[in-house]
Image (cartoon, helix red, strand yellow):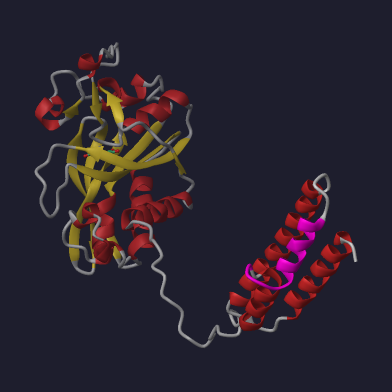
Amino acid sequence: MDHTEAFALYEKEALEAIAAAADSNQLEAVRVDFLGKKKGRLKDLQSLVGKVSAEERPVVGKLFNEVKLRVSATLDSRKSGLDKPKTALTSLDVTLPGAPIAFGKRHPLSQTIEDFKDIIGRFGFTVADGPEIEDEYHNFNALNIPNEHPARDPLDNFYLATAAYGINAGDSGARLLRSQTSTVQIRVMEQTRPPIRIVSLGRVYRPDTIDATHSCMFHQMEGLMVGEGVTMAQLKTVLKLFAQTYLGEDVTIRFRPSFFPFTEPSVEVDMSWRDTWLEIGGAGMVDPNVLRAVGYDPDEVSGFAFGLGIERFCMRRHNITDIRRFYENDVRFLAQF
Ligand code: DAH
């Protein structure tokens, strides 16, 4: 038998023996037999290499190495196959209780905002957005709040140091964090002609001292309806039906005379539910000056507007007694809604 035949026979028998090994002990015996360094089949083959002529030796040596490598690779892969636990699937006990997974939840205020959009949408109001960084024109002037009005007091507003950043404030005045969502009324009317029926929900900022019912940032839902012959009776109906849909049929709405520069007449809106009255926002008929500022003719169209505190509704509904809980991000609180 020449070396080529011997190599082939060795390889054939080795692979058969590897395949036939029933467990890792048998496989180890195969390894010692076929790949053992001291004695065994490999040693015999190696001595064949020593017997060929000096010219042939490099070629035969290479063949020998290749055969050896193939056998040992096959043995290794069989070994790792035998080492794997065979029972992975059958050992799964499907009757064990599953590990509880904590799912995230939407913040209660986000849930309320979604509810509000859904409810008010049924009255035909679509959702508009406006910037939280506003200019004085939209936050004040266009809402009939002139330069000398006390609502502009820097201590009552968060002005931004635009000049320090080289931003030219321009005609629309200094920039500030909006103090009310009423700004969006103006932005919408500037872009659209009546009839209008929109709401805008978002954050507003006021330097209030923080306590159980006040925060320097909170959320409002602004509403605006403008068209021919829009009345205060419609305003009251929309607010009443809205509150009843959110809380229940047993809600009553009450208007108290008030003043806002951008509405005439203006009212404070109170809501009673389960024998408790709560102020929920302001409202009124859009002031003719505001309509004029956006190029509408107050003799042709009229409108109502309202601004509701979103936190207040959510607190009332869920019996939350401290507004600060919303912003502390304590999951033990948030997970309850
Ligand atoms: N913007 C007022 C506030 O933040 C609330 C308000 C009052 C909004 C009357 C209105 C309105 O749209 O008509 O206190």
Q: Is residue 283 above or below residue 2?
A: above
Residue 142's quadrant in the figure? top left
Determine if residue 254 is in view: no
- Relative to 298, 310 lies left or right: left
Q: Is residue 274 above or below residue 185?
A: below
- Residue 25, percent across and down? 62, 83
Which is the main secondary structure of the residues drawn in magenta?
helix
Q: Quadrant of ligand 1?
A: top left
Residue 223 in magenta?
A: no
Which stretch is magenta? 37-51
Determine if residue 283 is in view: yes
Q: Quadrant of the C terminus?
A: bottom left
Residue drawn at (26%, 30%) of the image: 262
- Residue 156, percent across and down? 12, 31
Q: Quadrant of the N terminus?
A: bottom right
Q: As rendered, which of 132 and 162 lies closer to the eye?
A: 162
Q: As rendered, which of 168 and 34 lies closer to the eye?
A: 34
Residue 43 in magenta?
A: yes
- Residue 86, percent across and down? 62, 81
Q: Is residue 137 above or below residue 113?
A: above
Residue drawn at (34%, 51%) of the image: 239
Q: As rendered, which of 127 and 94 lies closer to the eye?
A: 94
Q: Outermost residue, bottom direction?
A: 95
